Image: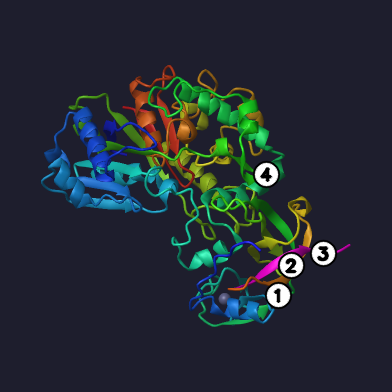
Amino acid sequence: MPPVIPPVPGHDDEFFWAGVRDGRLLVQRCADCHELRHPPLPMCPHCRSLEWEAAELSGRGTIHSWVVSHHPSEPDAEPRVVVVVAMEEGVRLVSNLQGRAEDAAIDLPVEVVFEDFGDVVLPQFRVVAG
Amino acid sequence: MNAAIVGIGQTEFSKDSGRSELQLAAEAASAAIDDAGLTPADIDGMVTFTLDTNDELALMRALGVPEVRWMSRTPHGGALASATVQHAAAAVASGAADAVLVYRAFNERSGRRFGQPDAARRGPAWNWYLPYGLDTPAKIYALWFQRYMHTYGVTNEDLGRYVVLARKHAATNPNAWFYGRPITLEEHQRSRWIVEPIIRKLDCCQESDGGVAFVVTTRERARDLKQPPVGVVAASQSHLWGGDVMFNYYHPEVADFPEATALATQLWRTSGLTPGDVQVAMLYENFTPVVFQQLEAFGFCGRGEAKAFIAEGNIEVGGTIPVNTHGGLLGEGYIHGVNNVLEGVRQLRGTAANQVPDVDHVLVAAGRSAAILGRV
Ligand SMILES: [Zn+2]
């Protein structure tokens, strides 16, 4: 298991990490104009509303970009595939692809899974079977 | 703009300067003031990066600058390297200062290395990147570049052709860390992956110790000074909603560099110039792909055409638009992109190591900031 630098949740994003611990992938939805947004912001950039609710994503998306991350100072650590995932609801988020680097490809369909790294649970993605 | 660069100065670029960052700043600043034919008493404005550790008052004390009435700093590191020109030019053009000293000095190799993982460097935004292993600039940028390279069929070997060229320019620049050390494409392709499959070791800028400085004053005052003045023809920054310092993951098109495109539009409009009016381009490259992105954004070639444009020799000295004639940040050294401003000035003065003939205008671009310098 790779060493993970845990997030330090604050006012604007603690809902996201609480959701992850419950196995739910949450993003903000403006309570007034209903636009989704990620990464979290205290204000809706479309209508400047401060009211929002947590919307659960389906967890399905496609790989929009990817790289293989080797840890430069801990060369024995397992390399990780870092991905930008375009979620089917329209937001993008950075995460990891489980499995081998050879499996990564642009536009590949993926789905979320939640992995416990000891200190922290992170959303991760895996290739959709078939 | 009513502004001109009248003095430039620098230290050597090394991997271990053996002296304090304040000494590097003071040496570079002192050289720039001398080069202009000014004295420390003439300096009444100072500009540097928010990331620079040298306090303005400390540098004033070291240089013996008696009184300053303008200080400002540029955020976002190297992306705003050329915004230092804009800050200084705005200060003198408005009358807020008469002579502005711009400086950037650090021990970026022997001291704090920006290229290393850094969990301490974090605001709330880092929660979206650090836990997933995106802990170095190389990784963060590579995850953006992948989409560009995928979209336009650019391979790491294509990147290597730029690196060979930058090292060729550096090899004949005595200022450069890689002076006398050109490389082949095969050597580039044998260097180890830093972020697979995008960036190899030789695609990364140098980590350097050193200091650079320049002095900006009005064009009227410039006429009476020691050096042929170099005018600030235009200077701007570009920041777009949804953008970030080091990447583009959230703009509609991740393969693009929309800030650089918007910046180019502003600069060509405000200067009245076109890409064909520029004889040398200094293009910031912390990593190779940014050169490709900027060549296209500034209109030196079409979208997706940079790999062919470079392979055809257009950006070599002797080509249609020589780029990074000092060897770039990959070849000369990484003084956060401000050394590119100095090379632009040398090309306009006619004193560059790899001098391009008949230079009237130089573009000095750093992705989200740029200046066009010109013969006055
Ligand atoms: Zn709204």
Closer to viewer: mark 2 or mark 3: 3
The image position of residue B55, as x and y in percent, is 24, 52
Quarter assignment of residue B344:
top left
Residue holding disc 2: A88
What amino acid is labelled 2 in the image?
Glu
Mark 4 residue element: loop
Type of amino acid under label 4? Pro
Tell me the residue at 30%/33% (across/down).
B11
Location of mark 3 (residue): A128
| Labels 1 and 3 touching (C-beta < 8 A) | no
- Where residue B20 sits, quadrant-wise, is top left
Ligand 1 closer than 8 Å to the CB at disc 1? no
Where residue B370 sits in the image (x, y, percent)? Answer: 43, 41
Share a chain, discs 1 and 3?
yes
In whole angstroms, how far apart are the C-alphas of marks 2 and 3?
A: 14 Å
* CA–CA distance in space, label 1 to label 3: 16 Å
Residue closest to the eye, A104 or B227: A104
Horizontal side, residue B225 vs residue B317: left or right: left
Q: Chain of mark 3?
A: A
Give residue B197's mark: 4
What colour-coding does the image apply? rainbow
Residue B88 image point, x, y percent:
29, 44
Q: Secondary structure at mark 2?
A: loop
| Distance CA(mark 2)–CA(mark 4) | 26 Å
Type of residue at label 1? Leu
Q: How many marks?
A: 4
Task: Using the rendered image, report if marks 2 and 3 lie on a common chain.
Answer: yes
Q: Quadrant of the N terminus of chain B?
A: top left
What secondary structure characterizes most of the magenta part? strand
First in sequence: mark 2 or mark 3? 2
